[in-house]
Amino acid sequence: MSVLIHFSIFPTDKQTSVSPYVAKAVRIVRDSGLPFKLGPMSTAIEGKDWEEVMAVVERCFKEIKKESGRIYMTLQMDYREGATNRIEGKIKSVEAKL
């Protein structure tokens, strides 16, 4: 099984650039050991189950909350039984058809 999420999180009560806060969240994602891909507007993470992936999201939220009274987050999720390595496989599937 595979849980693939695409999320972004950042404070809205800070200056124009929020990259220092985004970097804190990405560090948590990286340190989780789960496969991930950083993008210009969001980060994708793949895990084996809902709890595993959402625990990482929760840690990111709690970290940003330490310094912010207002946080914006988007999250998209795709669950698929019997699938693995979709963080790479979905891209390769489309590229093969181009």
Image: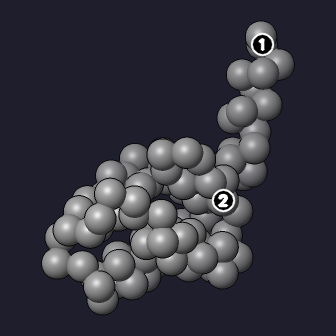
Element at label 1: helix
Element at label 2: strand
Residue 85, x across and y down, in percent: 74, 51
Q: In the displayed structure, would residue 93 be above or below residue 22?
A: above
The residue nearer to you, when weighing 66 against 61, is: 66
The residue lying furthest to the top in this view is 98
Q: Is residue 87 left or right of residue 63?
A: right
The residue lying at 59 percent from left, 47 percent from top is: 39
| Quadrant, the N terminus | bottom right
Give how far apart the Cα atoms at labels 2 and 1 are: 23 Å
Question: Residue 69 has which mark?
Answer: none
The residue lying furthest to the bottom in this view is 66
When asked about the image quadrant of residue 72, the answer is bottom left
Q: What's the residue type where badge 2 is placed?
A: Phe
Q: How is the image coloured?
A: one colour
Q: Kindly tell me whether residue 63 is visible in this rendering.
A: yes
Q: Is residue 81 left or right of residue 33?
A: left
The residue lying furthest to the right in this view is 96
Q: What's the residue type where badge 1 is placed?
A: Lys
Label 2 with label 1: CB-CB less than 8 Å: no
Q: In the displayed structure, would residue 41 be above or below residue 47?
A: above
Q: Is residue 8 left or right of residue 48?
A: left
The residue lying at 49 percent from left, 50 percent from top is: 42
Question: Residue 36 has which mark?
Answer: 2
Residue 19, x across and y down, in percent: 48, 64
**Tag 1 residue:** 97
The residue lying at 75 percent from left, 39 percent from top is: 89
The residue nearer to you, when weighing 82 against 13, is: 13
The residue lying at 17 percent from left, 78 percent from top is: 69
| Quadrant, the C terminus | top right
Residue 5, x across and y down, in percent: 49, 53
